[in-house]
Each structure stands twice: as C-alpha cells, then as structure tokens.
Amino acid sequence: MKKYYLLIILLIMASCTSKQEAMLSSEEEAQLDSLALRIAVMPVMDCLPIYYAQRTGLMKEMNLNACVKTYVAQMDIDTTLRKKYADVAYSDLIRAIRLMPTVNNLHAFMAGQEQLTLISQKGKRVKKENQLKEKMIAICRLSVTDYWCDAFIDSLKMNDENAYRPQVNDVQLRTDMLRTNLIDAGIYTDPYTTWMLGLGHRKIEQTKDQDPQMTTWLVRSDSTLSEEKEKQIQLFVQVYNQAIENINQGLLADSTKAILRDTYKIPAQVADSLILPKYKHAKAPEQEDLTRAADWLRTRKRLPQKINTEDLITTKYTKE
C-alpha cells in the first residue's frame, strides 16, 4: 500500500513539474521580442563569453537586444537553424557543411577555440596504443567530435573498425555516462574534461593550439534577417570581444563560476578551481580548416552534393 501511495505522489510531482515547465516555456515565448537577436548556444567553453555577457548585464549595457537559448545537443541547434528559430548559433564546420542544402545562405562568421580531449574510464586499464580496441567511445556523429575520434584513433595506430562509437549527442549526458561507468571512453570539452580528469579518468589524446579548429559560430543570412538584425550581429561580435576581455582579466569571476554551476551543471568545487582559457578576439574561421572538414566528409561519403563550401565562410562581421 505504501508503495502505491508513493507511486501516486511521484506521478503528481511529475505532473506538476511538467505543467510548470510548460508554463515557463509559454512565458518565455510570450516575452520573446521579434526584434531580438535569437542566439542558440551550448554549455561549452566557446559559449561562456555569451553566457557571461547575458548574466553580467553586458548585453544590456551595450544595447544588444538578444534572446539566448541553451541546447545540450548539436542536432537540436541544427533544428533551430532549419526552422528559423535562431539567427546565430554555435556549431562546427562539419555540421555547417551538412546544413548548407537545407538552410539558405548559411555562413560561418566567427571561429571557436574549443579544445577536445579523448578520456577513458579510470577502471578500464586504457592508457595508450591499441588499448581502446573493442571499447565504446561516445561521440556525436558527423561532427567535430567524430572528426577528432578518427584523428585520435589514427595517432594510436588503431584500426577504426576495432572501436565502437555510440552516438551520445547530449554533452552533459555523455559526461554522466563516463562518470557512472556506462561507457569506456568519450570525446569531451571543458569544463567536463577538467571534471572527469579530476575524478581520476584518464586523458588519452588532446587537441593542440596548432591543430585545425572546426568549432564555429553560424549566422543564417537569408531574407528573414532584417537590416536591424544585421546590426545586432555586428553588435554581437563587439559584445563577445568585450566579454572575453572581462573574462581574461578575471572581472566578475563570481558570475562566471555561477554560470558554470547553474548552466553547465558542474560541481561547485570544479567551477571554483577551473582554469579558464585565454580567449582571443573574434575572427573568421580559416578556409584551410573548412577544406579539411569537407575532405573528411568526402572520405565518409557524406559530403552533400551540389554545394559550394567556399561560400560558407564570411568575414563580413569580423573585419578589423
């Protein structure tokens, strides 16, 4: 009988939560200003300056009217671009190329600087060459994590067929799966890299500063992008540059730590001790990196037909 009542209570709580979430969602929709720049972001370090600018009031101070929405999977951000729910979105060059046939006038206008790390489960005796054979490496397929999984496997002199790659799109779920021993390894970015290494999981491979940088910010420049929003995108870059200067100088560090706790969902002790990257001012992605992304898709036989990848990058918003 007690179990029966407990089940009822749980169902009621779940129902109340769902109604509350639906209500909050409706309120958010009601508050959306049609003139606002709609920005789709993820809880990764490349997006921290935008979260920072929003939380500290920098956007308001610099008159950027923006609606920032968080997604934990790249495929969800793809959907926002296809359905015209976002004007600016965080992604990578590989996914951007794949989106070109379905999103008119899509452009990569600002390069990211994300570092990716292959981390193995601490109890799996995986340290180096050939020890990832027949192990599960969690990634997001046809994305920057998939690209670097290939590169890391090559560097370990492994046969690609010997590694299993379950698709785990949600970056926070991918972290939880390693933390709870559900996978053997995965590709991660900070702050999740620092969190997992702090728990004793092992770093196998990591990208370097001189490696190709494929994370990027995208803008949908079709006819729905008004002249006002064009100005907002230029202002977005200015806000980003000011935010990184503030972060690099350690200004309002408590706000940064609060973002890492609340939005990135990492423990307070990790947020407090995390060493932030030294952010660089906004610049357009490199054409050479775009070529690498296209070549990789071609080897996978997943490069879309009848597109000109040279049209993807624009320097319009990042000119000095």
Image: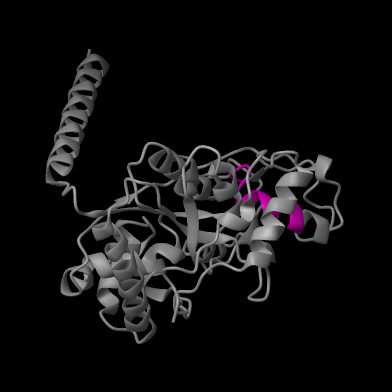
Picture coordinates of residue 156, whole percent (x, y): 82, 59
Q: Quadrant of residue 80?
A: top left
Query: Residue 152 vs residue 249: left or right?
Result: right
Question: Residue at the location (29% across, 78% down)?
Answer: 253
**Count of marks overlaid on the render:** 0
Picture coordinates of residue 282, whole percent (x, y): 45, 74
Question: Residue at the location (48% across, 46% down)?
Answer: 74
Residue span colored magenta: 139-152
Q: Nearer the viewer, residue 204 or 68?
A: 68
Q: Nearer the viewer, residue 316 or 91?
A: 316
Picture coordinates of residue 13, whole percent (x, y): 19, 28
Q: Quadrant of residue 5?
A: top left
Question: Residue at the location (54% across, 62% down)?
Answer: 193
**Residue 84 visible in the shown view:** yes
Residue 24 lies within the magenta run:
no
Q: Quadrant of the C terminus?
A: bottom left
Determine whether 127 is above or below 273 in the image.
Answer: above
Q: How is the image coloured?
A: one colour
